[in-house]
């Protein structure tokens, strides 16, 4: 049994040595690794906060843009309504104007010509009679 126990003890000694080397490496590397993990965690947290702030700013900008677009749409609607009212008012006003018949225009024009001719005769007769 001693013959079987010696190789087992040697194997356990090698395992213990390997474990010691692993523990030494872990003691050397673990603090810097943990520091890097901690730093990465803080950076991720900072980036998350920045993204949250940016998201809020974008949402505010979109809301403001939507309000501006709505105000423009309302203003355009009011301008359209006002233009329609003005156009309707002008059309009604022109429709309500009394129209002058064509015969009245002709007679009025000819009487004006006649008056001018008569005035011209009076002036020409006044000139001839000194």
Image: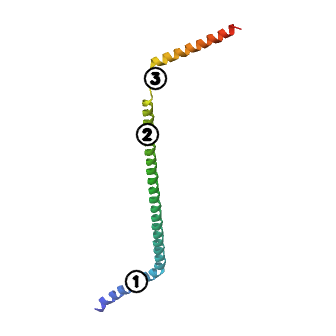
Q: Residues within 10 Å of mark 3 (few under 14, many from 20)?
A: few
Depicted 11 relative to depicted 110: above or below: below
Task: Residue 3 in the image: state x and y as whole percent.
Answer: 30, 90
Secondary structure found at label 2? helix
Name the residue at the left extreme.
1
The residue at which mark 3 appears reads as: 100
CA distance for labels 3 and 2: 27 Å
Question: SS for tag 1?
Answer: helix
Q: How many marks?
A: 3
Residue, far right: 130
Q: Is residue 73 above or below residue 96?
A: below
Q: Residue at x 39, y 86 (%)?
A: 16
Q: Residue at x 46, y 64 (%)?
A: 51
Q: Which mark is residue 19?
A: 1
Residue 85 image label: 2
* Residue 70 picture location, percent across and down: 43, 51
């Amino acid at each position: 049994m001693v013959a079987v126990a010696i190789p087992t003890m040697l194997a356990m000694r090698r395992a213990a040595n390997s474990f010691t080397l692993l523990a030494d490496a872990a003691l050397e590397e673990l603090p810097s690794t943990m520091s890097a993990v901690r730093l990465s965690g803080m950076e991720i947290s900072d980036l998350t906060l920045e993204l949250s702030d940016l998201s809020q700013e974008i949402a505010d900008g979109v809301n403001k843009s939507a309000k501006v677009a709505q105000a423009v749409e309302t203003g355009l609607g009011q301008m359209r309504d006002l233009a329609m009212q003005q156009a309707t008012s002008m059309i009604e006003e022109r429709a309500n104007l009394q129209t002058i018949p064509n015969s009245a225009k002709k007679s009025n024009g000819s009487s004006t010509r006649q008056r001018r001719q008569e005035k011209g005769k009076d002036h020409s007769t006044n000139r001839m009679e000194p």
